[in-house]
Image (tube, helix red, strand yellow):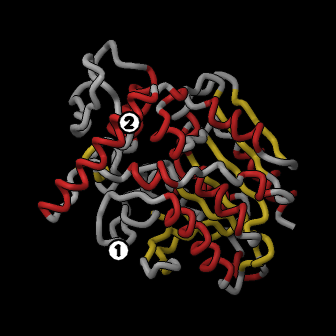
Amino acid sequence: MENKDTRTFEINPKIEMKKVQFRNRYGIMLAGDLYLPEGYGEKKNLAVIVSGPFGAVKEQASGLYAQELAARGFVSMAFDPSFGGESGGEVRNMASPEIFTEDYSAAVDYVGLLPYVDRERIGAIGICGLSGMAITAAGTDTRIKAVATLSMYDMSRDMSRGHMDCYTDQQRNKIKRYLSGQRWKDAETGTFAPGNHEIAFDENNEPITGMMEVPEKLPEDADPAFAAFYHYYAERARHPRAVNFVSSWTATMPVSFWNFPLMANIWEVSPHPILMVAGENAHSRYYSEDAYAAAAEPKELMIIPGADHVDLYDNRNKIPFDKLERFFRENLK
């Protein structure tokens, strides 16, 4: 891991950050930034692990969350999931719902063995596309005593059904044929071609399979959701190790998400609590609302007035840090 500090948010000089490494159950070495509150060595502390958004790195939104929680007295860690950022994994820019879920439990392993962490009081946060993995991990790993999601994206549903479940049966079959055909091409060349993880369709109702082209300047008529992502990933929080607006996923990556429905066992999180936070104007709001409806008690849904999806990445005026602090203090017991 490099020594240069490449965090994209304002750094709090009062909070110590240590770069750490740990292995998951598959033997992949993961990289994390461990944030430590003042006086952490004098007691057993509450801990929270954070990851996301999908395709982001720990120097972006998850690091901001971890730093803020450390300023509020938590030992916290932002980590890069397998295959991305500074974490290991031979095939780069790959994503796996199962392995990303395992990464959360591996992070619990690490922080729970720290001498200044109370291993009975560990929580988890998932931002955007890592929300489903945080919830899935909490459903089986009872060491996670409380879980919060921000701007949830259900990546399994998104890739297999499209935004707002827009894919027709015909389109779903076309996507499956495209992904299956791409596997032949990858097998023949011995490489992993890049492509989009969200498949759109052209005017002839055929899958658009090329990499997303990032404009040098945002068009005036850009879709509002695209514009919000662009302003974050391409401008104020651009990072060379992130996938979003920098490189691309492997083209066949969506296959595992079609096979692994992340919300299938959300009820298993109970009796541990879930807090879901979404922006009032977020294009992704329905993911949080639907997941909330499927979850068992105890659960809470918090809608942030006037916020869009990306506001909950780094807008301190919109991110409910006070609520997150109360949620974890009340439930990590």
236 horizontally vs 329: left or right? left
Pick whichever, 327 or 9, lies toward us: 327
User: Looking at numbered disc 1 in the image, what kind of residue is underneath it?
Assistant: Met
Q: Residue at x 75, y 72 (%)?
A: 143
- Residue at label 2? 173
Q: Residue at x 60, y 79 (%)?
A: 110
Q: Is residue 16 visible?
A: no
199 horizontally vs 329: left or right? left
249 horizontally vs 15: left or right? left
User: Looking at numbered disc 2 in the image, what kind of residue is underneath it?
Assistant: Asn
Q: Residues within 10 Å of mark 1 (few under 14, many from 20)?
A: few
**Tag of residue 1:** 1
Q: Residues within 10 Å of mark 2 (few under 14, many from 20)?
A: few
**Tag of residue 28:** none
Q: Residue at x 39, y 70 (%)?
A: 87
Image quarter (top left, top right, bottom left or bottom right) of the N terminus: bottom left
Q: Is residue 289 visible?
A: yes
- Place residue 48 in its image quadrant: bottom right
Disc 2 is placed on an element classified as helix
Depth check, mark 2 against mark 1: the one in front is 2
